[in-house]
Image: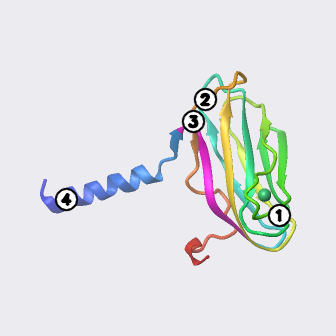
Amino acid sequence: MNNKMKKKLSILTICLAMSQASNVSAHNLTGKYLYSGDQAADVWQPSCLGEDTTGLGASINDIDPGRSNLSLLIYKEGKAVNTVDVSGGDGVNSPFVSLNMGPGVYTFIVAMSQAGVNKYDILFHCQDGKGGHPSGSTPTQPTQNEYPENESLF
Ligand SMILES: [Ca+2]
């Protein structure tokens, strides 16, 4: 294998590694943007991989000042819980809520009550019901993104 091929292969390997969801026990989706009207919604799908998983717990932090009522709805197989950050920019997360639906794919829906741009973090982990955090995966891309263009513009 020549050097040019090796370089191409290593770049491909890096790209593949970056496209995979990371498998760690503490999870954060940080600095994401919800953008457009008050009907906007971002959708993410994290997974809990451990067989001992009882549920998934999460909260959301509205990074931008103001009251947009940024909400995080957690859904799995016909059940859902919701949490709202009523005070943007104060560094305080919404209440931490749990949906106890075992291992598998969960769906996060991020929404807000006012039009505009809101930067947010979601903090979450899988739970085993005994204070432990079974392994899970953090999605690298949303399954629906209300701001699909270059997020570095903000
Ligand atoms: Ca807040």
On the picture, is 109 further left or further right than 153? right
Name which residue type carries label 2. Pro
Report the amino acid beneath label 4.
Answer: Met
Q: Give the range drawn in magenta.
A: 24-35
Sequence-wise, the earlier of marks 1 and 3 is 3
For residue 33, side relative to residue 3 (left or right): right
Name the residue located 86 percent from the left edge and 59 percent from the top edge: 86
Mark 2 vs 1, N-terminal side: 1
Task: Tell me the amino acid under the disc marked 3.
Answer: Ser
Q: Mark 1 points at which residue?
A: 112
Give the residue number, with chain letter if any, for mark 2. 134
Image coords of residue 98 (percent x, y): 78, 37
Q: Which residue type carries mark 1?
A: Met
Could you tell me if the residues under marks 3 and 2 are in contact, i.e. CB atoms within 8 Å?
yes
Nearest the eye: 110 or 107: 110
In terms of sequence position, does the residue under pointer 4 or pointer 3 come before the other? 4
